[in-house]
Image (tube, rainbow, N blue to C red):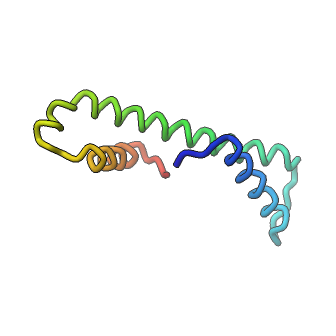
Amino acid sequence: MRLSPNKIEFIADETVLMLEKAHGVHIQTNADLVFRVIADIFFENMQAEEAIDAEVDELLTEYKGHISAMEMDFGALRSSMKREIIKKKGFIL
């Protein structure tokens, strides 16, 4: 999923607010630090997904001739390849 930096920061902010309001949860550090950690995790996740997308694109480019000759659906193949790479890497979308 592609998220803009503004959307990531919004989600991180909302998460901190929910944590602050949750019963049984007490943030024992600066809320800004918690916000930054949450936002950084989202950014890292997004970068990892972009790397997987680049790997899939590279494979599709490498085998483009074979894929075209077999009249395969690029979209379906891309999704399948991405799922397989994600599974191998233990990545969770």
Front position in the image: 33 or 26: 33
| Apparent side of residue 73 relative to residue 36 in the rendered image (left or right) | left
Residue sitting at 31 percent across and 44 percent down? 78
Q: Position of residue 41 (x, y in %)?
A: 64, 44
Lateral position of residue 87 relative to residue 63, left or right:
right
In this image, 39 relative to 1: left or right? right
Q: Is residue 73 left or right of residue 82?
A: left
Residue 25 falls in image quadrant: bottom right
Q: Residue at x 18, y 45 (%)?
A: 72
List the single residue furthest toward the left: 69
- Residue 27, given in percent of the width and then of the height, sits at 85, 56
Q: Position of residue 22 (x, y in %)?
A: 80, 69
Task: Give the vertical position of 51 relative to 78 (above or below).
Answer: above
The residue sitting at 55% across, 36% down in the picture is: 47
Q: How many marks?
A: 0
Instruction: Pick out the residue farthest to the bottom.
Output: 23
Residue 81 coordinates in the image, percent (x, y): 30, 44
Which residue is found at the position 76% from the left and 57% from the top? 14
| Frontmost residue, 62 versus 42 | 62
